Image (spheres, helix red, strand yellow):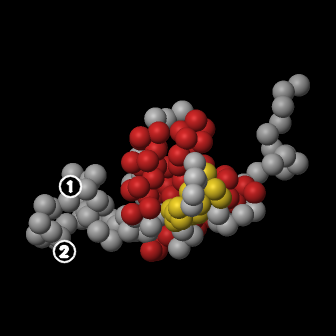
Amino acid sequence: MGKSYHHNDGFYTKINNDLLAALYKCPFNGTELRLILVVIRRTYGWNKASAFISYGCLADELGVDKRSIRRSMKLLVQDKVIFKESSFRTNLFSVNKDYASWRLWKSPDPRNKNVPPNGADEDKADPQKRGEVILT
């Protein structure tokens, strides 16, 4: 008989439902979302608030070029989704659990082509077209 995946006797990562909902409602690209999930796995999966993770380790784990990892992580840190503290050789990463403070929808996302160039008519624009996320 095949293996059943409905049992809880294995390892798992516990994550708050509101944080999970915020993750799938935000306009992350694939690499950004995968980086967040790795940080969650390395922290919450081991019942830790933060974890030392090198860019090389992240690149190996995700199978993505190290430069792409650095670029994506820089955006996540700027948007306050991930907290980063640099040390001698590695970086200490943690997920910002206060998703309301994420800057993804508070400032125009340069990756979003529907944002008015100078902010004109911003009040009239549809929130989803401005790159905003409405969390309920």
Q: Amino acid at mark 2?
A: Asp
In this view of the protein, which residue sits in the foreground, 51 or 130?
51
Quadrant of residue 117 in the image? bottom left
Residue at which label 1 appears: 114
Picture residue at 21% right of the left edge, 51% below the top? 113
Where 106 sits versus 67, above or below?
below
Q: Position of residue 100 (x, y in %)?
A: 46, 74
Residue at which label 2 appears: 123
Picture residue at 58% right of the left edge, 35% below the top? 60
Q: Amino acid at mark 1?
A: Asn
Judging from the image, what secondary structure is the residue with disc 2 in? loop
Q: Are marks 2 and 1 in contact (CB under 8 Å)?
A: no
| Residue farthest front in this picture | 88
Specify whether residue 37 is in view: no
Judging from the image, what secondary structure is the residue with disc 1 in? loop
Picture residue at 63% right of the left edge, 56% below the top? 52
Q: Position of residue 45 (x, y in %)?
A: 72, 55
101 sits to left or right of 129: right
In this view of the protein, which residue sits in the foreground, 131 or 74?
74
Quadrant of residue 19 in the image? bottom right
117 sits to left or right of 16: left
Picture residue at 34% right of the left edge, 67% below the top? 105
60 sits to left or right of 70: right
Callout 1: 10 Å neighbours few (<14), some, many (20+)? some
Where 80 sits versus 31, above or below?
below
Where 85 sits versus 58, above or below?
below
